[in-house]
Image: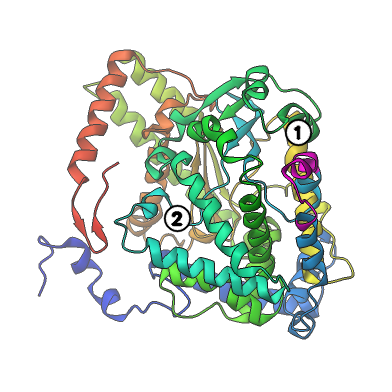
Amino acid sequence: MTRIQDDLFSTVNAEWLTQAEIPSDKPRISAFDELVLVNEKNLTADLQRMSVELPEGNPELLEAIKFYNKAGDWKARNTNDFSAVIKELDKVQRLTTFEDFRLHLLDLIFHSQAPLPFSLSVDADMKDAVHHSLGFTGPGLILPDTTYYAAEHPRKAELLSFWQKNSKELLEHFGLDEAQEIAAQAVAFDGLLVDSANTSEEWAKYAELYNPIPFEEFVNHFENIDFRSFVTGLVHTEPEKIVVFENRFYDAFDSIINAENWPLIKSWMLVKIARKASGLLSNELRLLGSAYGRFLSNVAEARSQEKHQLDLTESYFSQVIGLFYGLKYFGEEAKSDVKHMTSEMIKVYQERLDKNEWLSRETIDKAIEKLSAITVFIGYPDKLPEIYSRLKVRKGSLYEDACNFDELLTARHYEKFSEDVDKSLWHMPAHMVNAYYSPDSNTIVFPAAILQAPFYSLEQSSSQNYGGIGAVIAHEISHAFDNNGAQFDKFGNLNKWWTDEDYAAFEKKQEEMIAAFDGLETEVGPANGK
């Protein structure tokens, strides 16, 4: 028998560990995942009920239900009418030269399902969190991160081979005669991106990636793409700067995105269109399209049709479903109690900072100011993002609805550039079993779904609640002072507020923490302390 002093985790959770089973459509199981399963069951029952008794007085929820019904109309989905997908593929097929591609960039981003081989996205500016900026990155990789591309990685070859074969089979369903060559070229283009992509360690230090480039310098950096016209077409103005987050990609851009590589880029775009479309079509294609994800995660079975129907609806109406969930399943008494717990936990941080012996008084006072300025959101938001009023289910196929939604979402994304950042918006729906800290708004958010047993309940003792959700609250607050959060001030701006001596001491403690965990053996190999 394991002794508690030898293995606290295994002893405390002994009964659960012997009884818990990993569902066949999941890669893992935990207390979080068990709540996800409960929520899926409840929301499915709710949506099925509302599919018969359509909600009144809630136009956004009504559209979500209409989309849910269309997602579950397998008779219509299984007709294998791929005409809308073929139309999207043709938009790329007609671009015979790199010059064609250059001339149609705006049309591709606003009116097609084709991804571009680079990204310009709108987000709160790290150094001016009241305003938005444009961030420049690469398009991402096929495999989870750059380490998978190392020659010695045990899964590199099998994963790329599976993805290529799986993509070929998808393309064949849409009548592309050169499916094998297109899939191979897509993998070849992915290979060109690897050396310029950020590593997972680099992404983990996101505050250090902020590299603002003056607009004139940015547009003059490139020879192969007219970024002046492209950017002004996106946001209808010339911004002062573009923030580069993947510097190697920025430097290597013209050597990757060029006429010589256009056949590879074009094939990559075609495969991406086909893979995205598969989840919106027949059951056969959604199973085929999700096969790579299951192979990557070692998941035995695909999601059931019923669960897939819910997943798809959540992908477009997450906040709408979240608000419904919060209003139905979460109460004001619990909200008030969790708010009190959060205030108490912040006080503990303040008291411990006040007694800190390795920081100067100046830094301690500013840290306490930051704690006092944290905004806490609990349960569910007061309002929905405006975009949901635009999402209307129309006549036509599920795929056509999704294409229309994507166009509306893209247009709204770039509209935001000229607006001030709305810090009241949530970036996680209320029915998600999770919580987060946002450094650019100095906000912590606890969605309703995590505020239930075993993490929290009004029926549990104070000790149980502090041991459950209290630990989550303390964890989220800690992100305000982790290696990234510590670089943002109380207003959410990337700003040096530590003394030089204190930050040097903080970095030394980071290195000690990294060393404490680096190389420790786990079930999946040695830990990376960074």
96 relative position to 352: left or right: right
Residue toward you, 22 or 367: 22
128 relative position to 436: left or right: right
Q: Secondary structure at mark 2?
A: loop
- Packing grade of label 1 (10 A; few <14, some 14-19, many >=20) is some
Q: Is residue 236 visible?
A: yes
Q: Position of residue 76 (x, y in %)?
A: 80, 82
Q: Amino acid at mark 2?
A: Pro
Q: Which quadrant is home to the C terminus?
A: top left
Outermost right residue:
395
> For residue 97: magenta?
yes
State which quadrant residue 235 falls in: top right
Q: Name the mark on residue 129.
A: none
* Part of the protein shown in magenta: 93-106
State which quadrant residue 118 falls in: top right
Q: Is residue 409 above or below residue 172?
A: above
State which quadrant residue 523 falls in: bottom left
Outermost front residue:
260
Q: Position of residue 414 (x, y in %)?
A: 74, 38
Q: Name the mark on residue 230.
A: 1
Q: Name the mark on residue 144.
A: 2
Residue at (61%, 33%) from the top-left corner?
A: 135
